[in-house]
Image (spheres, rainbow, N blue to C red):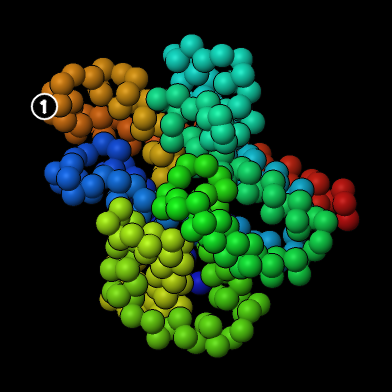
């Protein structure tokens, strides 16, 4: 999204890691159930994803673009595949009109939740879309300087989680601090906050941050769960500002870059194959014997979606954004 960001391979690497974690959490047994490995990898994947999302969105907004440019690009990126998937999933589920409305306007994750089995993962898209609208309104009404309030807003949401004792949730106000932590990272990276923070980030041990992030993603991590957004943001930030570190170099990987490219389609599509088709049917042994075939079909569909269906919509969004900028000028 932001051509001003160096070492985009590192960010793509993290995005590739995040989708691998999510797919593993949803489709593979990550150790005995008592280890709670699936839950941990799910939280890890999503915390990295939200950090990256917040970082890139804030980096874009700090350029002070027209608000409609931002909204059009984001909506054309998210909505076409999401709405197509929802049309199929909600039809299969026999959803009510209220449920269709809640899904198509991205508030199905708010109480009372109206998510169904095939759309349970759509909570993250609901959160993303709610964030886009909220940050766009803030930006439009109060200007680019208002973005400096984002760190305080993020801390306020974290304290709200602490007050209610919520380690993790799919409800927006219990999870948005993960996106806002990524936004705060962008403010630090682009030197909109105290420059000493950026210098300090260069010195933070990356492997230690990785361990702390893993602990904060596990139920047994206790209160460390409240700090998960900040460990994720610090870890991503440390690899961005210190790309020569061994961990950062591991992320500069063609496979991870490709996974990052098709990650949105992989995320949106995979529950349909796992819970709505023959590929995900059968008892435990049969189901996992089918997993290699499921992954093959999933990657084929994700590739086609990314480079044909989604690419057309993304190009259309960029074209429309340019026309709106031209008319405004």
Q: Nearer the viewer, residue 12 or 237?
A: 237
> Quick check: 73 left or right of 127?
right
- Is residue 228 at all visible to an observer of this figure? no
Does dot 1 land on a helix, a strand or a loop? Answer: helix
Residue 258 in the image, given as x and y percentages of width and height: 37, 51
For the point 30% across and 53% down, the residue is: 219
- Residue under label 1, please give it: 285
> Quick check: 58 left or right of 217?
right
For the point 27% across and 56% down, the residue is: 220
Q: Residue furthest left?
A: 285
For the point 41% across and 45% down, the residue is: 263
- The quadrant of the image that shows the C terminus is bottom right
Mark 1 crowd level (few <14, some 14–19, many ≥20, 10 Å Cα) = few
> Quick check: 267 left or right of 100?
left
Q: Residue furthest top?
A: 94
- The quadrant of the image that shows the N terminus is bottom right
Residue 62 in the image, given as x and y percentages of width and height: 69, 67
- Is residue 305 at all visible to an observer of this figure? yes
């Amino acid at each position: 999204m932001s051509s001003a960001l160096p070492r985009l391979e590192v960010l793509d690497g993290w995005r590739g890691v995040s989708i691998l974690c999510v797919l593993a959490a949803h489709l593979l047994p990550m150790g005995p159930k008592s280890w709670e490995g699936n839950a941990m990898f799910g939280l890890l994947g999503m915390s990295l994803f939200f950090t990256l999302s917040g970082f890139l969105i804030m980096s874009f907004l700090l350029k002070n673009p027209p608000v409609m440019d931002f909204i059009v690009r984001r909506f054309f990126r998210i909505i076409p595949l999401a709405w197509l998937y929802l049309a199929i999933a909600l039809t299969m589920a026999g959803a009510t009109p209220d449920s269709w409305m809640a899904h198509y306007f991205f508030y199905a994750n708010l109480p009372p939740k109206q998510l169904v089995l095939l759309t349970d993962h759509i909570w993250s898209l609901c959160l993303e879309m709610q964030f886009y609208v909220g940050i766009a309104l803030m930006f439009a009404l109060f200007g680019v300087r208002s973005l400096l309030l984002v760190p305080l807003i993020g801390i306020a949401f974290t304290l709200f989680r602490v007050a209610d004792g919520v380690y993790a949730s799919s409800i927006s106000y219990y999870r948005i601090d993960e996106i806002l932590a990524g936004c705060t990272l962008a403010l630090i990276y682009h030197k909109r906050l105290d420059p000493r923070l950026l210098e300090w980030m260069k010195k933070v041990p990356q492997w230690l941050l990785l361990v702390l992030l893993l602990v904060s993603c596990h139920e047994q991590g206790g209160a460390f769960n409240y700090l998960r957004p900040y460990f994720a943001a610090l870890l991503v930030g440390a690899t961005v500002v210190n790309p020569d570190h061994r961990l950062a170099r591991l992320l500069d990987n063609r496979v991870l870059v490709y996974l990052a490219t098709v990650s949105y389609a992989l995320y949106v599509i995979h529950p349909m194959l796992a819970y709505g088709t023959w590929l995900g049917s059968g008892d435990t042994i049969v189901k996992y014997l089918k997993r290699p075939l499921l992954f093959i079909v999933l990657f084929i569909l994700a590739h086609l979606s990314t480079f044909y269906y989604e690419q057309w919509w993304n190009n259309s969004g960029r074209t429309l954004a340019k026309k709106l900028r031209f008319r405004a000028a």
